[in-house]
Image: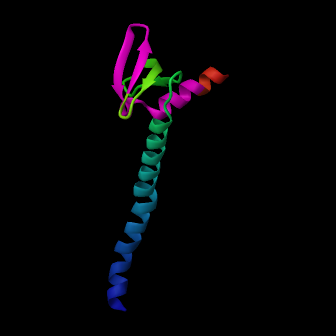
Amino acid sequence: MEQLQQFAPFLLMFVVIYFFMIRPQSKKQKQEKAFEESLKPGMRIVTRSGLHAKVVEVNEKTIVVETMAGKLLFDKTAVSLELSQALNEKEKK
């Protein structure tokens, strides 16, 4: 019984850390992965560095985008989920 009382605070800390840090992070990673899989030609995106572009071609791990300067090749992970969603929501209004 005493051993259980000694480990209770550690167990409680782990549960709190799981629900406030680990679980939200893994949920966000799943959302980003799903977004990367859903990229298709014609979509307007924003990269993590702030480049606004239109998707021209989608490959397994890369995308080709068209900007005012021409066509560029990016890794799919360079596309920002939050910024792209905000851009598309702004355009809908």
Q: Quadrant of residue 22?
A: bottom left
Left or right: residue 91 compared with residue 4? right
Q: Quadrant of residue 88?
A: top right
Q: Is residue 67 above or below residue 14?
A: above
Q: Residue furthest top?
A: 69
Left or right: residue 27 compared with residue 10? right
Residue 64 visible within the image: yes
> Camera-side residue: 76 or 20?
76
Q: Is residue 3 above or below residue 10?
A: below
Q: Quadrant of the N terminus?
A: bottom left
Report the colour scheme: rainbow
> Camera-side residue: 18 or 52?
52
Q: Is residue 77 above or below residue 55?
A: below
| Residue segment shown in magenta | 63-88
Residue 51 visible within the image: no
Q: What count of labels does the image hold? A: 0
Residue 20 pos. (x, y %): 45, 57
The residue positioned 45% from the left and 41% from the top of the image is: 32
Q: Residue furthest right?
A: 93
Residue 40 pos. (x, y %): 50, 28
Q: Residue furthest bottom?
A: 1
Q: Would residue 82 be counted in the magenta stretch? A: yes
The residue positioned 46% from the left and 60% from the top of the image is: 19
Residue 92 pos. (x, y %): 65, 23
The residue positioned 39% from the left and 61% from the top of the image is: 17
The residue positioned 42% from the left and 52% from the top of the image is: 26
Q: Quadrant of the C terminus?
A: top right
